[in-house]
Amino acid sequence: MYTHKKSLGQHFLRDENICRKIIAAVQERSFSQLLEVGPGAGALTKYILQLKGVDFKAVELDDEKVQYLLTTYPALYGKIIHQSFLAIERPFSGSFTIIGNFPYNISSQILFKILDWKDEVECVIGMFQKEVGRRIASREGNKVYGVTSVLVQAFFDVEYLFEVNEQSFTPPPKVKSSVIRLVRRKESIEMKDEKFFVQVVKTAFNQRRKTLRNALKGVFDATMLEDKLFNKRAEELSVQEFADLTFRKI
């Protein structure tokens, strides 16, 4: 009926209980426009098509899966974007929600694409590798807290929903998985310069074992670096503290 393509990171969800839990999670918040990323064989899609009053689109790169989906679910005609998610334009006007069993090999890139659309994306329910999900949700002081944690949490509230066993997929991945929810923050964290914020976060974590004074010496002048805050390491700073650093830009 269809094949599993390792090159595309395909692990198809087959556990109906997990599918229903994901659909229940997305229904906890109201939405009128929904994008599914990587529908694959339609494990979630068949439930999404049952939702009433939703403008639904699915983005799928694999030719074979597109044909399978259209044959199996004729209601998808006109609703499939046959491209890589990383290459598409914004799929809707106005706010929309994203759902998906994200390919693990590009999950970080998917997140950064979503951040590009942060003003329109109101909620994301996504399946990630367990370690990636934990990283996205982790707070300062945690060993896995890093660039992704800070950049995502600056714009979204993150909730780690539940974990998923390897046997819930065909073929089973070699890692456990997790489902997380991102909800656009009601109140944005104040920052002076968003591009500078991203630069500071990435530079600080690029040398996370060093103090901020050493890691950021090419970003702030020597006088600024005398502040005791720069005695800390990147993983010790909260998202708000990183945002506050943007106001120290010369």
Image (cartoon, helix red, strand yellow):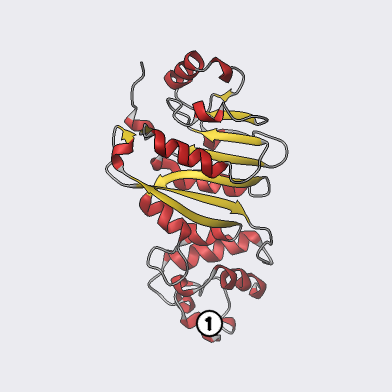
Of residues 6 and 131, which is closer to you in this image? 131
Residue at far right of view:
94
Residue shown at the point (37%, 51%) measured from the top left: 130
Tell me if residue 240 comes above or below residue 18 in the rendering: below
Q: Position of residue 110 (x, y in %)?
A: 50, 43
Three-letter amino acid code at the position of disc 1: Leu
Local secondary structure at mark 1: helix
Classify residue 222 as left or right of residue 141.
right
Q: Where is residue 112 shown, x and y percent of the image?
A: 53, 48
Residue 101 can be seen, yes or no: no
Residue 190 appearing in the image: yes
Q: Nearer the viewer, residue 237 or 213?
A: 237
Q: Residue at x 40, y 52 (%)?
A: 132
Q: Residue at the spot x=55%, y=62% of the render? A: 199
Q: Quadrant of the N terminus?
A: top left
Q: How many marks overall?
A: 1
Dot 1: within a 10 Å radius of its alpha carbon, few (fewer than 14), some, or many (20 or more) residues?
some
Q: Is residue 73 above or below residue 83?
A: above
Q: Nearer the viewer, residue 115 or 179?
A: 179
| 51 with respect to 61 (left or right) | right
- Residue 15's image quarter? top left
Residue 20 higher or lower than 194, as above or below: above
Choose top left, top right, bottom left or bottom right for residue 152: bottom right
The answer to whether 165 appears left or right of 213 in the picture is left
Q: Which residue is mark 1?
A: 229
Q: Quadrant of the C terminus?
A: bottom right
